[in-house]
Structure formats: C-alpha cells, structure tokens
Amino acid sequence: METVRRLSSARWLIPLLAVIGADGGSRFGILARRLPISRSVLARHLALLEQFGWIRRNPGHGHPLRPEYLLTEAGPPVAGWCERAMAARERMGLEPDAFGRWTLPLLFELAPERRRFTLLQQRLAPVTPRALSLTLNQALSERLVERQSPAQLYGLAERGRDFAAPLLV
C-alpha cells in the first residue's frame, strides 16, 4: 500500500515509470516528447522516482545535459505494476484524469471489503474529508466504486474489481 501511495503522490509518476520500464530506460528528452508534461514537472517527477529508489541516472551516458534514467534493482517490479496500471486504464477507456491522488489508494482500501467513509478516511490518512469525498464521487461517476444504502458502505463495483484485479497481484 505504501508503494501505491508513493506512486499516487504525483500525477505523472505512474505513466513515467511505465515508460521507463517498458523501454528499459530512457533519456530526459525522449521522456519529454512522449509525455505531455513540461520539462520542469518532468524533472521534479524524475527526482521523486530517484528519491524513492526506483530509478537512477546512468553515470556513463553521454552529455550531462542529456541524462539517461535506468531502473534500479528495486525498480522493475514497481515499473511492471505501473505498466499493468496504464494498460488496465487504457483497456477500460479511462481518461488519464480519472485518477486523482487518492483514487488508487482508495481502490486498494476497498478491494478486500466494503467500508464506511470514516474508516476510509482513517485508513487513508492524511486524506482530508473533502479530498476523499471528491475522490469517491469521481470513482462513483466512473463506475469503479458503488455505494450501498442505507448503510452508506462503499465498495468496488464490478468495473473497479476488473480494473484492480491485475494490480493486486
């Protein structure tokens, strides 16, 4: 769950790590062309991935202004997970903005059983009530989550289970 939280902490970490993993490494310029993000955002996200220990700069590669990034020993399983997450999102026709910061952690919390809002808020701390409410509403609109009334229990909808199944491995 901690890995999912880290990957969800910034919008482009999952797509970025999926590309690096699929390509077996990549240069900054290539990543900047493949993903629709600014160079400054890309640099911040690469620094986060380095900080988490999933990628490293290739010290023996070319000019320092054209760095190449490779997976560390800890990187391949996480990159593989990111590739599966991107493939599942595309297979289900979900737009990239269908996933906010708390969407994947929410789906992981709901995978084993239905939960009440207050328990979700406790388990996803430091999520705010507003952020959790917005995430739940978006997941409900995407039919990833369903609400059971009158108990107000939230659980994965069939579509959410289909999405989460390959990621829970």
Image: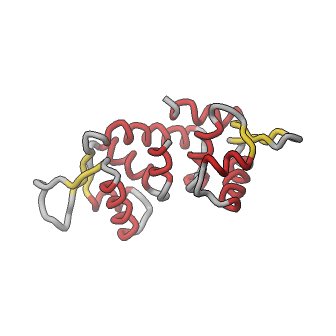
Vertical position of residue 158 compared to residue 129: above or below: above
Q: What residue lies at 32% left-to-right and 38% top-to-bottom? A: 76
Q: What residue lies at 50% left-to-right and 49% top-to-bottom? A: 5
Render colour scheme: secondary structure
Q: Is residue 108 left or right of residue 141?
A: left
Q: What residue lies at 39% left-to-right and 52% top-to-bottom? A: 16
Where is residue 67 shown, x and y percent of the image?
21, 60
Vertical position of residue 80 compared to residue 41: above or below: above
Q: What residue lies at 37% left-to-right and 65% top-to-bottom? A: 44
Query: In this view of the protein, which residue sits in the foreground, 132 or 137?
Result: 132
Quarter of the image for residue 110 reads top right
Q: Is residue 27 left or right of residue 78?
A: left
Quarter of the image for residue 107 reads top right
Where is residue 131 shown, x and y percent of the image?
66, 60
Query: In this view of the protein, which residue sits in the foreground, 138 or 147?
Result: 147
Where is residue 26 shown, x and y percent of the image?
27, 51
